[in-house]
Each structure stands twice: as structure tokens, then as C-alpha cells.
Image: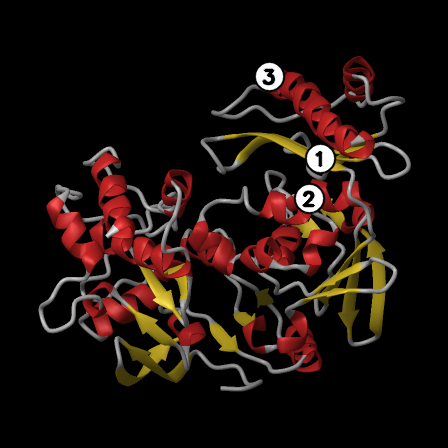
């Protein structure tokens, strides 16, 4: 799809190391492509308005909200979702810290929180308290009051 | 039934500015898609329903920051807030990265662009008043070639700029200067602004106020003293809108407060 206009396109993406090729409508949001077309339902839709961050994924190394991108914009991209974190059922240090620190109650925001914190710790393995808070500014949690999430990320950073 | 928030839309991903202009000029109802952090959302709400989206994400020449020998920054409109925050070149005008770091959150800053921010011309955006205060210049390309518009003439109304149908913002130029300030009253930290102000004290003193009218309001206080700044703001006879966050009267009051804070920051840098 170069300079021609189309309402349908065939896109190729790599998600958690697996290559996918699908035909999608141009109006399809990336989050719906991931969840409904590929059945990777770990990525959540919380608000559909770009506010809550439950749909956060890492696209070509950059944290984004997948409800504010069209699937066609991700053509050729490499994407990481929450399903890609644990390897062979073994939790990442961050995921284990979320469990140890009870950093979730209902769990709805957790996939987005984990992706935001993963992106933070990759870029900045020893964040300050303020940097941790700012890193999850785009992720809303309505259960925990954020304290245990903050403690989990801090513990994972110090581990 | 899969979720379908957006109306059916055509999509194209040109590789060059010329292709993008042909697409924008050749299709009624075509709109440029930059980072999408505003446009995708207003399309979900169907407050905007373009027929064709021209995705600028595949045009390398629209992204990047160059520092000319004379100190002028030339910024591609597809440069993201995160690019501006982390760019060594952009530190030539430090206020740019400082203000971009106050916009929304990491995810939005990673996708949202300087060009999208100014072209959406939302009166609550951070960058329109900043561009006016620092004396930015916008280069606009169309089928008939390029033209350059000063930032103060670029913003024409709510959601309206000097970029006409079939045209594209291709470059933002920022003159050198380090004595700038910015202040805002946001809804929550780094949230949408209720009132904001950008000040520049490089030579003369210029303040541009945001959120108080359709476009940034420029005032030029006689001195950086808080009373002189407040008097200049009062002299502008602002008529800001009332909404659930603030009454017009309260916005008018806040305009004096944030203008004084922005000027103080700029003049401290000028004297420091």
C-alpha cells in the first residue's frame, strides 16, 4: 500500500515473535486487530478513548496505546503484548513483583501497567520514585490506589 | 460482531511529501494523519469523519530536528514529543522539550507530534501559544510550492490553521533563544490545560496566552514586573469561555497568574 487509497489492506506484523498476515479494514484499531482478529486477548480495552492505558503495547520498542493507532499503521511492525512477557510459564521479575506486592485487585489494568513498567525498566533500569510515577501516568487503576503497583515496580527495579 | 468505532475510511501511506500533497489535493475529504493522538479519537467519536486518511508516518523527510549554524531549529512536523524531549539539538531552545514533557503521558508523547499539535489548533493545546511566543515559522507546501507563515498568523480559529485543503505543514522553524517560560493550570498533572501561557524575553517581552480564545492571544507587557504583566493581560480584554472546569471570569483571573509565572521564568533565565 504505497500512494494508493484503499479501505482494505493486507498487513504483516510480528507479535511476540510470531508473524501474522491478515487483511484488515483501514478503520480497524490496532487493539481490535490484536484482540478480535488474532485472539490475543491479554491486551485490554478499558476506555476506548485513549485515557486508561489498558491497551498499552510496545511497538518497535516504543510504548503506545493500541486504541489510538490503526492496525494498518502497524504494518511491518514488531509488537510486544503482555502474552510475550513470560517465557515458558516463567514470570518476568516484574510480573513476579506484581504478584508478591499484590499490585492488582481486579487485574483489568494489569496488562497495560506491565507493558508500561517493562518499557520503563528497559530504558531506565534504576528509575527514581518520580520516574516510576511518571511512567505509569498514562495507566489508570481504579482498585489499588497505585501504591502496590509503585512498590512492585520499585522492587523489580532493585532486584 | 467486532467492534467498529470508526466510519469506513480510505487509507494511503505515501513515501514522499509530493505524493502526500497529491493525495490530499486529489481527494475530497482527505486529511493528513500524523501521530493520531487527537484525530483517531475524534474519529471514534465521529466528531471528524474524513473520507481518506493520508498517513504521514512513512515520509522520513518530515521527521527530525536540525540545528542551523545560525542557531535556528528546523523541525519536521512528524517529530514526536519524545523526540523533542530527548534531542540534543532541541536543547538549543530548552523550552521546547520542557513543554513537551508536560503533555499527557509517555504513550501519547511517544506517538503525538509537534505538527499534529499545532495543526489540530485545539485552543487547550500547549504548543500553539508556545510557537507564537518563540516566534516560530511554519512552512506549508502545496501543489503550487511552498510558503512560510509566522506562527502568529498560522492559527486562524478553533481547529483551523493556515494549512488549506490540499496543503501540508512541512517544517517548523524556531529562532535561537534561551530566555523563555511556560506556565499552565492543567486538569491534573500534565493534563489538559485550563489556561496556559508562554513567554519569551529574547529582546522584547512577548506573552502568548492559550485556552482563553479561539487562537493564542498575544500581549506585550511594558516590563516583566508582575503588575505590568497583569495590566497587559487586563488590557487584552479577554473573553474566555466558561465550561465545567472554570468560568470565564476565573479563566480571566488565571490568565494574569500564569502570564506572570511564565514571564518570571523567562526573565529569571534572561538575568541568570
Viewport quadrant of the C terminus of chain B: top right
Question: Does residue A48 appear to the left or right of B249 in the view shown?
Answer: left
Q: Nearer the viewer, residue B158 or B148?
A: B148
Select label 2 or label 3 by which is in front. 2
- What residue is disc 2 on? B95
Q: CA distance from mark 1 to mark 2?
A: 7 Å
Question: Does residue B260 appear to the left or right of A101 in the view shown?
Answer: right
Could you tell me residue B82's position as x and y percent? 54, 56
Q: Residue at x 63, y 15 (%)?
A: B249
Could you say which quadrant of the image residue B113 lies in? bottom right
Q: CA distance from mark 3 to mark 1?
A: 22 Å
- SS category of the residue bearing label 1: strand
Tags 3 and 1 on a common chain: yes
Return the mark for residue B130.
Answer: none
Return the mark for residue B250.
Answer: 3
Could you say which quadrant of the image residue A78 lies in? bottom left
Badge 2 vs badge 3, beta-carbon distance below 8 Å: no
Q: Residue at x 90, y 37 (%)?
A: B203
Question: Does residue B186 appear to the left or right of A36 in the view shown?
Answer: right
Q: Nearer the viewer, residue B240 or B93?
A: B93
Chain of the residue on which disc 2 is drawn:
B
Badge 1 vs badge 2, beta-carbon distance below 8 Å: yes
- SS category of the residue bearing label 3: helix
Residue B174 in sight in this render:
yes
Please, which residue is most extreme toward the top here? B227
Select label 3 or label 1 by which is in front. 1
Q: Residue at x 60, y 30 (%)?
A: B184
Mark 3, other Cα within 10 Å: few <14 / some 14–19 / many ≥20:
some
Return the mark for residue B181.
Answer: 1
Amino acid at each position: 500500500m504505497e500512494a494508493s487509497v484503499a479501505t482494505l489492506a493486507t498487513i504483516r506484523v510480528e507479535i511476540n515473535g510470531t508473524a501474522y498476515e491478515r487483511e484488515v479494514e483501514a478503520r480497524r484499531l490496532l487493539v481490535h486487530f490484536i484482540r478480535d482478529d488474532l485472539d490475543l486477548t491479554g491486551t485490554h480495552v478499558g476506555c476506548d478513548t485513549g485515557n486508561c492505558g489498558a491497551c498499552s503495547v510496545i511497538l518497535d520498542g516504543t510504548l503506545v496505546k493500541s486504541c489510538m493507532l490503526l492496525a494498518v499503521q502497524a504494518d511491518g511492525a514488531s509488537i510486544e503484548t503482555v502474552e510475550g512477557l513470560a517465557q515458558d510459564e516463567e514470570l518476568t521479575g516484574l510480573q513476579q513483583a506484581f504478584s508478591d506486592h499484590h499490585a492488582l485487585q481486579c487485574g483489568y489494568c494489569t496488562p497495560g501497567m506491565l507493558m508500561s513498567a517493562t518499557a520503563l525498566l528497559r530504558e531506565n533500569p534504576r528509575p527514581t520514585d518520580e520516574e516510576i510515577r511518571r511512567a505509569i501516568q498514562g495507566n489508570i487503576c481504579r482498585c489499588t490506589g497505585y501504591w502496590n503497583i509503585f512498590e512492585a515496580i520499585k522492587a523489580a527495579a532493585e532486584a | 460482531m467486532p467492534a467498529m468505532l470508526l466510519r469506513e475510511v480510505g487509507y494511503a501511506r505515501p513515501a514522499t511529501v509530493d505524493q502526500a500533497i497529491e493525495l490530499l489535493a486529489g481527494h475530497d475529504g482527505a486529511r493528513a494523519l500524523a501521530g493520531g493522538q487527537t484525530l483517531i479519537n475524534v474519529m471514534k467519536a465521529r466528531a471528524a469523519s474524513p473520507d481518506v486518511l493520508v498517513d504521514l508516518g512513512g515520509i522520513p523527510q518530515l521527521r527530525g530536528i536540525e540545528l542551523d549554524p545560525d542557531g535556528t531549529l528546523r523541525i519536521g512536523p512528524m517529530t514526536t514529543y519524545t523526540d523533542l524531549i530527548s534531542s540534543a539539538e532541541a536543547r538549543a531552545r530548552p523550552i521546547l522539550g520542557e513543554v513537551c514533557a508536560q503533555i499527557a503521558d509517555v504513550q501519547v508523547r511517544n506517538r503525538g507530534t509537534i505538527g499534529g499539535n499545532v495543526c489540530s489548533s485545539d485552543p487547550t493545546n500547549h504548543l500553539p501559544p508556545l510557537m507564537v511566543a518563540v516566534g516560530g515559522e511554519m512552512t506549508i507546501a502545496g501543489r503550487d510550492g511552498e510558503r512560510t507563515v509566522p506562527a502568529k498568523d498560522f492559527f486562524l480559529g478553533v481547529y483551523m490553521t493556515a494549512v488549506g485543503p490540499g496543503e501540508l505543514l512541512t517544517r517548523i522553524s524556531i529562532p535561537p533563544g534561551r530566555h523563555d517560560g511556560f506556565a499552565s493550570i492543567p486538569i491534573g498533572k500534565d493534563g489538559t490545560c485550563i489556561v496556559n501561557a508562554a513567554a519569551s524575553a529574547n529582546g522584547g517581552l512577548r506573552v502568548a496566552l492559550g485556552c482563553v480564545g479561539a487562537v493564542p492571544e498575544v500581549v506585550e507587557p511594558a516590563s516583566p514586573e508582575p503588575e505590568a504583566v497583569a495590566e497587559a493581560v487586563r488590557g487584552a480584554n479577554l473573553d474566555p469561555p466558561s465550561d465545567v472546569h472554570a468560568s470565564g471570569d476565573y479563566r480571566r483571573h488565571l490568565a494574569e497568574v500564569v502570564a506572570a509565572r511564565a514571564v518570571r521564568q523567562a526573565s529569571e533565565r534572561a538575568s541568570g
